[in-house]
Image (cartoon, coloured by chain):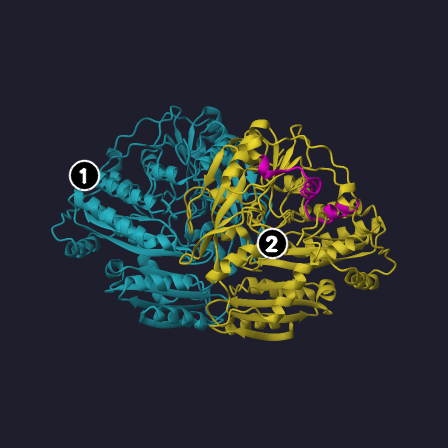
Chain colours: A cyan, B yellow
Amino acid sequence: MGRSWWGWGTTEDALSRSDADDLAATVAQLLPGADLTAHEPPEPRSIAVPASRVEAPASLAHLCSDDHVDRLAHAHGQAFRDVVRALLGQVEHVPDLVARPRSEEDVVALLDWCSEAGIAVVPFGGGTSVVGGVEPRFDHDAGAVSLDLRTMSRVLEVDDTSQSALIEAGVLGPALEAQLRPHGHTLRFYPQSFEFSTLGGWIATRAGGHFATGSTHIDDLVESIRTVTPSGTMESRRLPGSGAGPSPDRLILGSEGALGIVTRAWMRIRERPRWRAAATVSFADEAAGVRAVRAITQSGLQPANCRFLDATEATINAGASSAILVLGFESADHPLEPWMERAVEICRDQGGVLAEPPRYTGSADAVARSGASDAWRSAFLRMPYQRDALAARSMIVETFETACTWDRYDELRAAVTTAAEAAMRSLGLPGVVTCRFTHVYPDGPAPYFGIYAAGTWGSTVEQWDEIKAAVSEAINTAGGTITHHHAVGRDHRPWYDRQRPDLFAAALAGAKRELDPAGILNPGILLG
Amino acid sequence: MGRSWWGWGTTEDALSRSDADDLAATVAQLLPGADLTAHEPPEPRSIAVPASRVEAPASLAHLCSDDHVDRLAHAHGQAFRDVVRALLGQVEHVPDLVARPRSEEDVVALLDWCSEAGIAVVPFGGGTSVVGGVEPRFDHDAGAVSLDLRTMSRVLEVDDTSQSALIEAGVLGPALEAQLRPHGHTLRFYPQSFEFSTLGGWIATRAGGHFATGSTHIDDLVESIRTVTPSGTMESRRLPGSGAGPSPDRLILGSEGALGIVTRAWMRIRERPRWRAAATVSFADEAAGVRAVRAITQSGLQPANCRFLDATEATINAGASSAILVLGFESADHPLEPWMERAVEICRDQGGVLAEPPRYTGSADAVARSGASDAWRSAFLRMPYQRDALAARSMIVETFETACTWDRYDELRAAVTTAAEAAMRSLGLPGVVTCRFTHVYPDGPAPYFGIYAAGTWGSTVEQWDEIKAAVSEAINTAGGTITHHHAVGRDHRPWYDRQRPDLFAAALAGAKRELDPAGILNPGILLG
């Protein structure tokens, strides 16, 4: 299967013309009058790309490619604005070379070369960044190399006793799971990009995972990290917990390729779940639903799934007519009736009504996945393909996310929605804003917003950028984080800089000077 | 009540002479022939203290004390080696002044003065460091000020909705809980030092808390931190979760006063528990008990208590005759029978026998603590007083702790025990080594070792130092961490330096140069 050079995933899995037409017809009902003419991506070889400024030394030439389409495919991530610019043939920041190390020794050799020659290095995992994290959007006279780690994709060691595995950073989600499955284990980390993103990318961006509650950020699953920097290699000790000074791993988690290249990590894995429980609760009163979610997160029950969809989101993506809460528990150890029953009771206390009563599957022998959960997962993974089909029809379809404490949520939600609607109105674009919770904590939710607006072909990037700036301002002012699990990249820098304590920026710069003295690693990311 | 200038806690709560004699009699049975003559602490004013090299400016004089006993009491922590040296009158590293800021403005003013004058600053919370963290054990010509934060002890704000509270760093455990109680909330963080240690100290040392599993390190309970550094003040945003760059809080957590002074923090609090379940399981085969604990940590049940005591530890501290596992669950939300029943089943699968069958207490109305749990807690908090009484009778009574992955545990345990026994043998000291788990993770335990040996009066510090060096070598070689929750301080530096990646040390030094350019903060801690 071929990865698309411009859009999500593989060309084979993209929406067929008839599926795209069906989707467009649905959207036309929601936004009557929208111009949904389909636009085709340009032939990549028709897009002008500047001559490469970089020539690899003979010893590394076999790892490097200056192929036109290869360079184009490494020139952007997978944000809406990336996909649309590619559709328009506007690919302006193209790496001079794509390098594919096969081993850590190759990474060291490539970094040594680039350090010495002052060439910028952009670490590239699956290329699914939605924040401009892999786009060489900087001026660097000596040129830029995109360091694509996907060739380093092995599970090197599985420790069944400690439920940990040593995994190369370039592995994609499915290949990672396929290698753990014979051991009966799973990382159980399913970002929406699962099929096309890598372990190293998840670590570098502090990605958010499968579980809606509890230990779910990739941060929690890391036992130790090995990182190659221009100053040398560093590896933390494998430890289940430690109080020995500030955590070395936590400096690398979220460093987005600006401090080093993650080459491998020991990850906490787990047994594949045997029992599952699922239920859906609907709430006529959205505020009551939010209270129920809060009570569940503060109850200690830790459901695997606790996704709350507002009425608009529920209508569009779940065929419901009011806000719903999708509840799920899973376990490799025990049946889940008491957990689910108490969670449902909490919902009822807040006026929730069972839309789908609890279903229990599994036994001590069952490891199979339920059909319903399969269907949801499949739909979830299809969403970016739908986004691409709509983006090619002038739609502005994008998401943004944050997290805030519960006391600030109502205000943040209102401010963000108002800002998005005002921005669409001032642009003259009909559209809707949806909201769901992807992750919830005892002290606050991670709201995830969706925008569906009918844009103007040729201007949708600028239109989206205006909307995005407005909602980012609202998030920042209302006390949210500019990103809960999409990372900072280049697109979030202005708001990240305001959210981050200045002295922490200084400390980070002090650390970077030690690890990357020439400043070649992902210029413009986090610092500078 | 008066804090002891030399030993644990308050003079009023120290063991009475007759209680100490009873304890000595018990020890004599365990270690026949030991010389258990009681030695009295010296009169503090008889201990020579060099004249203070530091004079506070007039504007800060009201915050500073150069009182002889005050300076002595800030010259050491509460490790066995600290207590014994004080008993012997060997107090060699005395701060020139003790400063007691009443507000953050005071902290800023004191740091400004010390920065300008090049005076070293040792942040002092409760002074319960067991690793030399608060002892001014360094040469610094301009002198050293001990910055005692205990006057800053208020809970400033409680957010009942988000279950968070803004708390000043100098508050001791009991005063913190007393201020949360009217809100029905608790931090539920009970290190053994609870009565005499501070929130700021817990954060600076990455202390380990009440819960044996799950989110229990103070790291997990921090929502945001405010830190004063010589370069200015930095405060992270209150967030339940964030993926925006490396976590600013995680740089401060574990910084042990070397990067800044924590002045306040938003902490995750919780409702006081209403339901409790407790049981004790005994294991004739210790290895089977370890397997049961591992299975429980990997089950997702997350017991509040899961303390496994080896046979020696169980004999000395629990009157049992084989290894035991003390299991407990607690909840503010729901009864706990299904949780406890499954945990007991896991134990039975490994050959465990119920020594005390499950007891369930509580109801939706009950918030009271059970008598049994009170008794255990009280005994736990008494242990350091017993340690002092035995230390004054030539006993070497000390603990050390680590964490490692499960696959390495058997080897680490054997290596540590062998090293301790060999060291005692070569010193000619009869003694025993005990082991329990204080915290357990899906990927490994945090073993906590105890040493009880009959030492030689006047030489017990050197004798302990030899044993400690031997076990620290064993821990380091076997892949453990030099500390799971006691911190690094000055005593653990040689092994910390070997455990920590060199490049992380460089990055940390780069960060410190930005935050503490004159290098006045706790010299010798983590770096230098």
Instruction: Find residue B508 and name its label.
Output: none
Question: What range is drawn magenta here?
Answer: B61-88
Q: Which residue is at a point 21% across and 48% down the rendered structure image?
A: A421
State whether the magenta stretch is mostly helix, strand or loop. Answer: helix
Of all residues, the one furthest to the right in this rendering is B33
Residue behind mark 2: B405
Q: Is residue B512 left or right of residue A409?
A: right
The quadrant where residue B346 appears? bottom right
Identify the subunit bearing mark 1.
A
Residue behind mark 1: A458
The answer, for residue A13, to whether it is visible in the render is: no
Q: Quadrant of the C terminus of chain B?
A: top right
Q: Is residue B86 left or right of residue A46?
A: right
Q: Is residue A378 left or right of residue B22?
A: left
Residue B89 pos. (x, y %): 78, 43
The answer, for residue A95, to whether it is visible in the render is: yes
Give, as a three-letter code, the residue at label 2. Thr
CA separation, marks 1 and 2?
55 Å
Q: Is residue B411 left or right of residue B174?
A: right
Give the camera-side residue of B102 and A263: B102
Determine crowd level at label 2: few under 14, some 14-19, many 20+ residues with C-alpha closer than 10 A. many
The quadrant where residue B66 appears? top right
Q: Quadrant of the N terminus of chain B?
A: bottom right
Give, as a three-letter code, the residue at label 1. Gly
